[in-house]
Amino acid sequence: MKLIDNFLNSEEINYLQQCRKPWDIQASDYLNPECLEFLYYAPVLDKFYKYLFEKITKEIGQYSATRVYFNGQSYGMDGSFHVDNCDKTALIYVSPYNREWGGFTQVGEEIIAPVTGRMIAFDGMTPHKAFPFSRQTCPMRITLAFKLNENRN
Protein backbone atom coordinates (compact mmCIF):
# COMPACT_ATOMS: atom_id res chain seq x y z
CA MET A 1 0.00 0.00 0.00
CA LYS A 2 1.13 3.53 -0.72
CA LEU A 3 -0.08 6.44 1.43
CA ILE A 4 0.54 10.07 0.46
CA ASP A 5 -0.48 12.86 2.81
CA ASN A 6 -1.26 16.26 1.27
CA PHE A 7 -1.82 14.61 -2.11
CA LEU A 8 -4.39 17.34 -2.79
CA ASN A 9 -3.76 21.02 -2.20
CA SER A 10 -6.40 23.30 -0.67
CA GLU A 11 -7.76 24.45 -4.07
CA GLU A 12 -8.18 20.84 -5.25
CA ILE A 13 -9.88 19.86 -2.00
CA ASN A 14 -12.23 22.83 -2.24
CA TYR A 15 -13.12 21.96 -5.85
CA LEU A 16 -14.03 18.38 -4.89
CA GLN A 17 -15.91 19.43 -1.75
CA GLN A 18 -17.97 22.00 -3.68
CA CYS A 19 -18.80 19.62 -6.52
CA ARG A 20 -22.56 19.06 -6.53
CA LYS A 21 -23.22 15.35 -6.35
CA PRO A 22 -26.59 13.90 -7.32
CA TRP A 23 -26.11 10.80 -5.17
CA ASP A 24 -27.33 7.36 -6.23
CA ILE A 25 -27.38 4.11 -4.23
CA GLN A 26 -24.84 1.36 -4.78
CA ALA A 27 -23.48 -1.76 -3.09
CA SER A 28 -20.01 -3.19 -3.59
CA ASP A 29 -21.39 -6.68 -4.26
CA TYR A 30 -25.14 -7.14 -4.69
CA LEU A 31 -24.67 -10.94 -4.73
CA ASN A 32 -23.39 -10.85 -1.15
CA PRO A 33 -26.31 -10.61 1.33
CA GLU A 34 -23.93 -9.07 3.92
CA CYS A 35 -23.01 -6.22 1.58
CA LEU A 36 -24.56 -2.89 2.59
CA GLU A 37 -25.57 0.00 0.34
CA PHE A 38 -23.85 3.38 0.28
CA LEU A 39 -24.03 6.59 -1.73
CA TYR A 40 -22.34 6.81 -5.10
CA TYR A 41 -21.78 9.47 -7.75
CA ALA A 42 -19.88 9.14 -11.05
CA PRO A 43 -18.71 12.59 -12.17
CA VAL A 44 -18.29 13.72 -15.75
CA LEU A 45 -14.60 13.13 -16.36
CA ASP A 46 -13.49 16.60 -17.32
CA LYS A 47 -9.99 18.12 -17.36
CA PHE A 48 -9.82 18.21 -13.57
CA TYR A 49 -10.35 14.46 -13.12
CA LYS A 50 -7.88 13.72 -15.94
CA TYR A 51 -5.41 15.98 -14.12
CA LEU A 52 -5.97 14.00 -10.88
CA PHE A 53 -5.51 10.72 -12.75
CA GLU A 54 -2.17 11.94 -14.14
CA LYS A 55 -1.17 13.03 -10.64
CA ILE A 56 -1.98 9.53 -9.32
CA THR A 57 -0.05 7.74 -12.07
CA LYS A 58 3.01 9.90 -11.38
CA GLU A 59 2.98 8.44 -7.86
CA ILE A 60 2.11 4.79 -8.52
CA GLY A 61 3.02 4.05 -12.16
CA GLN A 62 1.13 3.73 -15.41
CA TYR A 63 -2.41 2.40 -15.23
CA SER A 64 -5.67 2.76 -17.10
CA ALA A 65 -8.71 4.03 -15.20
CA THR A 66 -11.70 1.71 -15.51
CA ARG A 67 -13.99 3.62 -13.12
CA VAL A 68 -13.89 6.93 -11.26
CA TYR A 69 -16.54 7.78 -8.67
CA PHE A 70 -17.31 9.32 -5.30
CA ASN A 71 -18.39 7.23 -2.31
CA GLY A 72 -20.57 8.86 0.33
CA GLN A 73 -21.39 7.59 3.80
CA SER A 74 -23.47 9.29 6.44
CA TYR A 75 -23.64 8.27 10.09
CA GLY A 76 -24.83 4.66 10.36
CA MET A 77 -24.00 3.72 6.72
CA ASP A 78 -21.36 1.11 7.47
CA GLY A 79 -19.47 -0.42 4.56
CA SER A 80 -18.88 -4.11 3.94
CA PHE A 81 -15.66 -5.98 3.20
CA HIS A 82 -15.23 -6.36 -0.53
CA VAL A 83 -12.64 -6.43 -3.30
CA ASP A 84 -12.66 -4.07 -6.27
CA ASN A 85 -11.81 -6.57 -9.05
CA CYS A 86 -9.07 -4.34 -10.44
CA ASP A 87 -5.28 -4.23 -10.23
CA LYS A 88 -5.06 -1.10 -8.09
CA THR A 89 -7.47 1.16 -6.21
CA ALA A 90 -6.53 4.78 -5.53
CA LEU A 91 -8.70 6.39 -2.88
CA ILE A 92 -8.63 10.13 -2.13
CA TYR A 93 -10.19 11.49 1.06
CA VAL A 94 -12.32 14.54 0.29
CA SER A 95 -14.35 15.29 3.45
CA PRO A 96 -13.31 17.55 6.29
CA TYR A 97 -11.77 15.37 9.01
CA ASN A 98 -11.46 15.38 12.78
CA ARG A 99 -9.75 12.42 14.44
CA GLU A 100 -12.60 12.20 16.98
CA TRP A 101 -14.97 11.21 14.15
CA GLY A 102 -13.42 7.87 13.14
CA GLY A 103 -14.37 7.12 9.54
CA PHE A 104 -11.44 4.80 8.95
CA THR A 105 -10.74 2.60 5.96
CA GLN A 106 -9.60 -0.92 6.70
CA VAL A 107 -7.43 -2.48 3.98
CA GLY A 108 -6.54 -6.03 4.94
CA GLU A 109 -5.39 -5.61 8.54
CA GLU A 110 -4.31 -1.97 8.16
CA ILE A 111 -6.43 0.91 9.46
CA ILE A 112 -6.13 4.25 7.62
CA ALA A 113 -7.50 7.53 8.94
CA PRO A 114 -9.45 9.55 6.34
CA VAL A 115 -7.29 12.67 6.53
CA THR A 116 -8.51 15.33 4.10
CA GLY A 117 -6.36 15.39 0.95
CA ARG A 118 -4.71 12.02 1.67
CA MET A 119 -4.43 9.43 -1.10
CA ILE A 120 -3.95 5.72 -0.58
CA ALA A 121 -3.31 3.19 -3.32
CA PHE A 122 -3.61 -0.54 -2.73
CA ASP A 123 -4.08 -3.84 -4.52
CA GLY A 124 -7.69 -3.84 -5.76
CA MET A 125 -8.06 -7.52 -4.82
CA THR A 126 -7.31 -6.87 -1.13
CA PRO A 127 -10.49 -7.02 0.99
CA HIS A 128 -11.28 -3.58 2.38
CA LYS A 129 -14.08 -1.71 4.09
CA ALA A 130 -15.03 1.91 4.75
CA PHE A 131 -16.43 3.07 8.07
CA PRO A 132 -18.63 6.21 8.28
CA PHE A 133 -17.96 9.04 10.68
CA SER A 134 -19.13 8.04 14.15
CA ARG A 135 -21.44 10.89 15.13
CA GLN A 136 -24.78 12.13 13.87
CA THR A 137 -23.45 15.68 13.77
CA CYS A 138 -20.51 14.81 11.49
CA PRO A 139 -20.47 15.70 7.82
CA MET A 140 -20.81 13.01 5.19
CA ARG A 141 -17.64 10.97 4.70
CA ILE A 142 -16.69 11.35 1.03
CA THR A 143 -13.93 9.68 -0.94
CA LEU A 144 -13.02 9.74 -4.61
CA ALA A 145 -12.11 6.28 -5.95
CA PHE A 146 -10.10 5.45 -9.05
CA LYS A 147 -10.27 1.79 -10.12
CA LEU A 148 -7.14 1.08 -12.12
CA ASN A 149 -5.75 -1.72 -14.27
CA GLU A 150 -2.18 -2.19 -15.46
CA ASN A 151 -1.41 -1.20 -19.02
CA ARG A 152 -0.77 -4.57 -20.69
CA ASN A 153 0.77 -4.56 -24.15
Image (tube, rainbow, N blue to C red):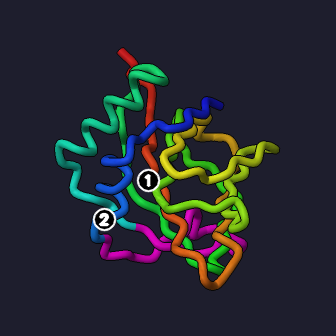
Instruction: Determine whether the residue tagged by mark 1 lies in a helix, strand or loop.
Output: strand
Give residue 66's quadrant in the image.
top left
Between circles 1 and 2, the one closer to the viewer is: 2
Q: Foreground: 128 or 140? A: 140
Q: In this image, 58 relative to 82: left or right?
A: left
Q: In the rendered structure, which amino acid carries the disc numbered 1?
A: Leu
Magenta stretch: dominant SS?
Answer: loop
Q: Foreground: 59 or 123? A: 59
Query: Eyeballing the image, is 153 above or below 115?
Result: above
Verify whether residue 34 appears in magenta. yes
Magenta range:
21-40
Report the residue that reaches farthest toward the right.
Answer: 109
- Tell how many labels: 2
Whole-Å distance between the Cαs marked 1 and 2? 13 Å
Query: Eyeballing the image, is 144 above or below 95?
Result: above
Residue bearing mark 2: 18
x, y percent for residue 30: 57, 70
x, y percent for residue 140: 52, 73
Q: In the rendered structure, which amino acid carries the disc numbered 2?
A: Gln
Name the residue: 49% across, 57% down: 143
Name the residue: 55% across, 33% down: 4
Query: Eyeballing the image, is 98 above or below 23?
Result: above
Any part of residue 89 in sight: no
Name the residue: 31% across, 48% down: 11
Number of the label disc, if any, that sits on residue 144: 1
Name the residue: 58% across, 64% down: 29
Disc with the residue nearer the chain's start (1 vs 2): 2
